[in-house]
Amino acid sequence: MAEVQKKKVEDKYNTSSIKKKEEKTVKKVKKNVSEKKEEKVGKKNIFVRFRIFCNGVKNEFKKVHWTSKEDMVKYSISTILFIIFCSLFFYLIDIVFALIRSLFA
């Protein structure tokens, strides 16, 4: 019985439309803030914008995880071995198909 009454109360106070309105206003505010930032950046000197760009690049390079020399050697050797294996495999398949073709020709 309590569950039925609770549903009636929830239905009576429909909050979904209020939440939608709040989301729309938040989006508008975020859009206005981003437009103002773009206006400020657009008005700055080209050298200032270039310096900001370089600082951003430097910060992104700090986030990169560089592999160690030992890992790079291991990865390089495994890559070279894989390429050799694949090339030999396809070379042998080519020879087999050439032999089959010569037998039936």
Image (cartoon, helix red, strand yellow):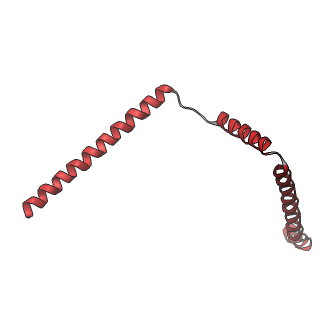
Image quadrant where residue 28 sits: bottom right
Question: Is the residue 16 above or below the residue 46 in the image?
Answer: below
Nearest the eye: 39 or 7: 39
Residue 34 point in image, percent of width and height = 83, 55
Nearest the eye: 5 or 54: 54
Nearest the eye: 22 or 81: 81
Residue 78 point in image, percent of width and height = 38, 35
Residue found at the very far top of the displayed protein: 70
Question: Is the residue 65 above or below the residue 92 in the image?
Answer: above
Q: Answer with left or right where residue 27 lies relative to residue 101.
A: right
Residue found at the very far front of the displayed protein: 46
The residue at the point 62 percent across, 36 percent down is 64
Residue 60 point in image, percent of width and height = 67, 39
Q: Answer with left or right where residue 61 lies relative to residue 36.
A: left
The residue at the point 70 percent across, 36 percent down is 59
Tell me the quarter of the image containing the N terminus. bottom right
Q: Answer with left or right where residue 56 lies relative to residue 18.
A: left
Tell me the quarter of the image containing the C terminus. bottom left
Q: How many marks?
A: 0
The residue at the point 41 percent across, 34 percent down is 76
Image quadrant where residue 101 sits: bottom left
Residue 50 point in image, percent of width and height = 74, 42
